[in-house]
């Protein structure tokens, strides 16, 4: 199916709920540096297209994704019960456990677009996503190139039950196979800085020869970079994934070697546009729609990103 990416405005001020994988960070209760640009993109899309976009998040305060699954299920159930939602964009904390309540929403007449992380259901309007596998492969190939074709590498994984984490890891491995790379091991740090710091510190004690640590998101890359700095082993490459503001600054400072820009704002805008087209014209879409570009952020081009975000 060919997708027409031409944007249209709404014929009615539909109410669209935006339910990201949001976590509270301390008492500030701010969005993470990945989801804030996604929400900014969603709000701008609402303004540009003439719909009401509502941020729907839980006040749960936890340290792991598993602690947010049930609250997110309750959020969607409450939207169904309230009966005022015309469309839903969601990034599920768990691809399997969110599926039943999302299918209830669809049965209640609420079309759903998943974003960033899939829902294991064939009833969605579509799934908008950055190509995690191809981006992971690009990072793996970049590491091979930087290491001159051979070396010892470790991988910091995301949660094993999330498809985006699986795709990134498989992409990393595919990219690393372009060289003579020895993968010493892989562990999940649940997307978080502190667990990644501990895992990386343990690896640094265990392995005398490490050339690179590939992390499936920027938080984990920052944790690994901190452990590397504390061990004074700065020759080790560290790569992230997300191009968060703090990661861009870390790339500029030489603490992280590279990251990937997933363009979350563009993902959110596309998801909302698809809901508008469906609500207005009944248009349907392929099961998965990938964003077309895979931009790597490295020391050579990081200044451009810093300038675009007003960080320099």
Image (spheres, rainbow, N blue to C red):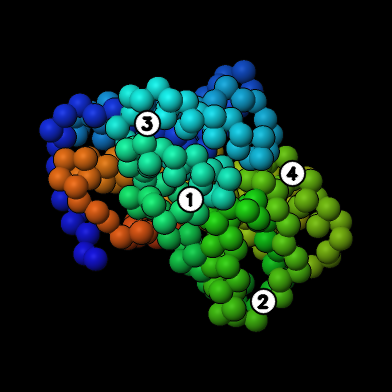
| Lower sequence index among marks 3 and 4 | 3
Q: Secondary structure at mark 4?
A: helix
Q: Is residue 198 above or below residue 56?
A: below
- C-alpha separation, residue under disc 4 versus residue under disc 2: 25 Å
Could you tell me if residue 241 is visible in this image? no
Residue 47 rendering spot, x and y as whole percentages: 23, 28
Q: Secondary structure at mark 3?
A: strand
| Lower sequence index among marks 4 and 2 | 2
Quadrant for residue 68, please give it: top right
**Foreground residue among 162 and 201:** 162
**Foreground residue among 205 and 117:** 117
Q: Which quarter of the rendering shows the N terminus?
A: bottom left
Query: In the rendered image, which residue does mark 2 sit on?
Result: 181
Residue at the image position 71 percent from the left and 71 percent from the top: 183
Residue at the image position 22 percent from the left and 45 percent from the top: 278
- C-alpha separation, residue under disc 3 versus residue under disc 4: 32 Å
Query: In the rendered image, which residue does mark 1 sit on?
Result: 119
Q: Which quarter of the rendering shows the C terminus?
A: top left
| Lower sequence index among marks 1 and 2 | 1
Query: In the rendered image, which residue does mark 3 sit on?
Result: 17
Residue at the image position 54 percent from the left and 50 percent from the top: 95
Is the residue marked by circle 4 packed among few (<14), some (14-19), or many (20+) residues within 10 Å?
some
Is the residue marked by circle 2 packed among few (<14), some (14-19), or many (20+) residues within 10 Å?
many
Q: Is residue 5 above or below residue 63?
A: below
Residue 214 rendering spot, x and y as whole percentages: 63, 59
- C-alpha separation, residue under disc 1 versus residue under disc 4: 26 Å
Query: In the rendered image, which residue does mark 4 sit on?
Result: 195
Q: Are marks 1 and 2 in contact (CB under 8 Å)?
A: no
Residue 307 rendering spot, x and y as whole percentages: 37, 40
**Foreground residue among 144 and 269:** 269
| Lower sequence index among marks 1 and 4 | 1
């Amino acid at each position: 199916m060919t997708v027409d990416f031409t944007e249209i405005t709404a014929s009615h001020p539909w109410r669209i709920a935006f339910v990201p994988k949001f976590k509270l960070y301390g008492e500030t209760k701010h969005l993470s540096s990945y989801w804030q640009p996604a929400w900014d993109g969603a709000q701008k899309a609402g303004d540009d297209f003439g719909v009401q976009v509502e941020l729907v998040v839980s006040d749960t305060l936890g340290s792991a994704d598993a602690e947010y699954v049930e609250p997110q299920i309750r959020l969607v159930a409450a939207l169904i019960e309230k009966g005022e939602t015309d469309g839903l964009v969601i990034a599920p904390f768990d691809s399997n456990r969110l599926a039943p309540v999302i299918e209830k929403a669809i049965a209640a007449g609420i079309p759903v677009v998943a974003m960033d992380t899939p829902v294991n259901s064939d009833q969605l309007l579509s799934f908008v996503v950055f190509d995690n596998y191809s981006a992971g492969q690009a990072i793996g190939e970049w590491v091979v190139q930087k290491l001159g074709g051979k070396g010892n590498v470790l991988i910091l994984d995301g949660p094993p039950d999330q498809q985006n984490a699986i795709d990134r890891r498989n992409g990393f491995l595919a990219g690393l196979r372009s060289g003579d790379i020895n993968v010493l091991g892989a562990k999940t740090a649940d997307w978080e800085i502190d667990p990644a710091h501990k895992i990386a510190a343990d690896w640094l004690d265990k392995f005398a020869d490490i050339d690179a640590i590939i992390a499936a998101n920027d938080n984990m890359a920052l944790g690994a970079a901190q452990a590397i700095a504390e061990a004074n082993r700065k020759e080790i490459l560290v790569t992230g994934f997300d191009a968060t503001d703090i990661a861009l600054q870390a790339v500029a400072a030489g603490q992280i070697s590279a990251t990937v820009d997933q363009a979350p704002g563009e993902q959110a805008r596309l998801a909302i546009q698809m809901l508008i087209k469906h609500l207005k014209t009944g248009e349907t879409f392929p099961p998965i729609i990938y964003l077309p570009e895979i931009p790597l952020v490295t020391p050579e081009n990081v200044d451009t990103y810093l300038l675009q975000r007003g960080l320099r």
